[in-house]
Structures are given as C-alpha cells and as structure tokens.
Amino acid sequence: MALVYNTALLPGVDLSNLTWNPADGGSFEQVIAKATVDKNGRNGLDPAFDKNNVKVYGFLPEWADGSQGQNGWGDLAASNGFTFVDKNPWGTHYNFDDPKLAATISWYRSIVDKGYAPKFDKQSTLGRDAVMDSGQGAITITGSWTINSYLSATAKQKYAFAPLPVGPAGRKTAINGLSDAIYAGTKHKDQAWAWVKFLGSSACQDLVAKNAVVFPAIKEATDKSLAAHQAKGQDVHVFTDEAAARGGTFFLPITDHGNEISQTVQDAIQSIILGQTDAAGGLAKANGTVNAMFQ
C-alpha cells in the first residue's frame, strides 16, 4: 500500500518522509490540511478556512473497507501498534476493542469534522478513483494493483506515489496476494494441479513481472517487474521499498467467519464516522460480537 496523490494539487510538497500519530495527525495531517481548499481558495491551515464549502479535499478515506482496513485505517492502526488477532492464520480472538484502533478511527473522524475529508454520506456513493480523477481529492491510500489505473495515459489527472507515513510503531503496510486453489470436486485434478504448479513457478511469475500489471509473487522477479514499470516511465519503487523494509509489512487476518466479521466491523466504523456512536464503545461492541462467533 502507498499514498497516491494528484501532483498538480501538491506542487513542490515532499511526501516521502511523512509522520502520523492519532493525537494531532503529525506532518501527514498538515499536508492534508494544506491540500484541502475551500470555495474561496483558502486551505485548511488558514484560520478563515470554510469547512462547510470545500472545493478540494486533502484526503479521501475508504469507508467500505471491511474488517481489515487495507486501503487506509488498517495500515495506520498497525503503525500505531494495533494487531488484529491473537495469531495468524486461524486466530480465534480479535482485538477490535484495542484503544490503539479506537484512536486511529477517532483521528479519521476528526479530519472529517475539520473538513479535510468528505463526510461519509457525501462520499459513500462515489468511488475514490472517481473523486480523484475529478480533481476534488488530493491524496488517498491505494494498493500496488492500481498502478496502471493511476499512471495510464487515460488518467484525467497526473499522479505520483509516496510511501505511507511513519506512525508511532513505524511504517506498516498490509501485504496481500492471491491464493491458487483447486475445486475438490473437479474431474480434472491432474490438469488443475499442473496449472496451479505453473502459477506458482518462476516461469509464470516472470511473465507477470514482464507485463508490469501486478507485482509477482516470487521475490526474485521483483527487479524484473520494476524494470518493466520503468520502461513504461512509471516510478513505483515505493511499493517494493515498503515490502523490503524489515518489519514493514503485516499479513491480513485469515480466520473463520470472515464475511460476518467484515460486515460487523465495517458497520461499526461507518456508525462511528457518522457520529452515531463513539469509537471506543462502537468498536468494543463489535469486538464482542466478533469473538462470540468463535465460542
């Protein structure tokens, strides 16, 4: 995961060494505030900034992000020291009641209240990509699989990538991939097994790297993928730098009841952002519901 930003809205601003904390947002919030502009041209650092009439939002959160927050809150919560579950994979006790997560979600709520991010009921009907492409959003968090969407010739704005901010526990990014599986009832087990073995082979992953669409699953093919991106004029090293950093990545939780957990936690976070409940109480209630699924 990384920051993607509209270069025209942040001219001359260095996003490579941002810091973040849930108390005051660190330099990350300062950049977000500076990139937020109201209808009168005042940015979020101006005392006269009008939060009720915003033309460009400094940051676009992802609210439909399940129980993992891969596209935003989960990465920042991890950088605040939060861990999702007692063990991974197949943990049986979640920690959504952790004050470190509540503080993270409260910070998200605070930037909405300040006008730096759109209210949930205004943004929820539009995808972040659409808002970014309209020039009404300056920064969001995205995954490496969206590289070609943002850097393609058809993109309506000029974008660049920057690393996620460094939190109290360091810079943390979710790392995710695909799992190749065979249907247990298949009538073609040998052929399916041959295909799955090929998908995980260097030969296949070198093809993935050469086409510069997503990063390959084999580390040895990373340099080939970077070279392919560079040949297309794409600077995407922030993703591989983060992946290579010691302790810089975390795995998303793999447990039973995934769909039910995702909906329960997403509903709770949306209620918090809407002001229907406080972060600590809403997350504690959701956590009780989630852990009851394992009893």
Image (cartoon, rainbow, N blue to C red):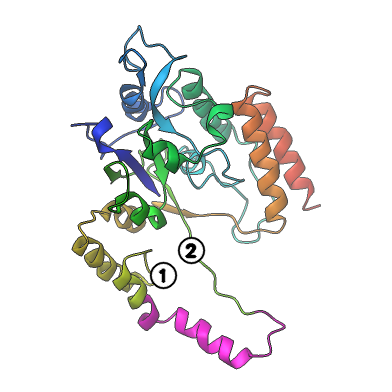
Can you identify the residue that label 2 sits on?
177
Q: Is residue 51 magenta?
A: no
Q: Residue at x 63, y 43 (%)?
A: 95
Q: Residue at x 42, y 51 (%)?
A: 143
Cβ–Cβ below 8 Å for labels 1 and 2?
A: yes
Part of the protein shown in magenta: 183-205
Q: Is residue 199 magenta?
A: yes
Q: Pick whichever, 151 or 252, lies toward us.
A: 151
Q: CA distance from mark 1 to mark 2?
A: 7 Å
- Residue 286 in the figure: left or right of residue 174: right
Judge whether 290 appears above or below 168 on screen: below
Judge whether 140 appears above or below 245 on screen: above
Q: Residue at x 33, y 24 (%)?
A: 30
Q: Is residue 260 visible?
A: yes
Q: Is residue 246 visible?
A: no
Residue 68, horizontal then vertical, whole percent: 57, 47
Can you identify the residue that label 1 sits on?
217
Tell me the element at label 2.
Answer: loop
Residue 160, horizontal then vertical, whole percent: 27, 45
- Residue 238 in the figure: left or right of residue 183: left
Q: Give the main secondary structure, helix, strand or loop, of the magenta stretch.
A: helix
Q: Pick whichever, 192 or 78, lies toward us.
A: 192
- Residue 258 in the figure: left or right of residue 128: right
Q: Residue at x 61, y 46 (%)?
A: 66
What label does residue 158 carry, if any? none
Give the amino acid at mark 2: Gly
Residue 135, horizontal then vertical, whole percent: 35, 33
Tell me the element at label 1.
Answer: loop
Give the amino acid at mark 1: Ala
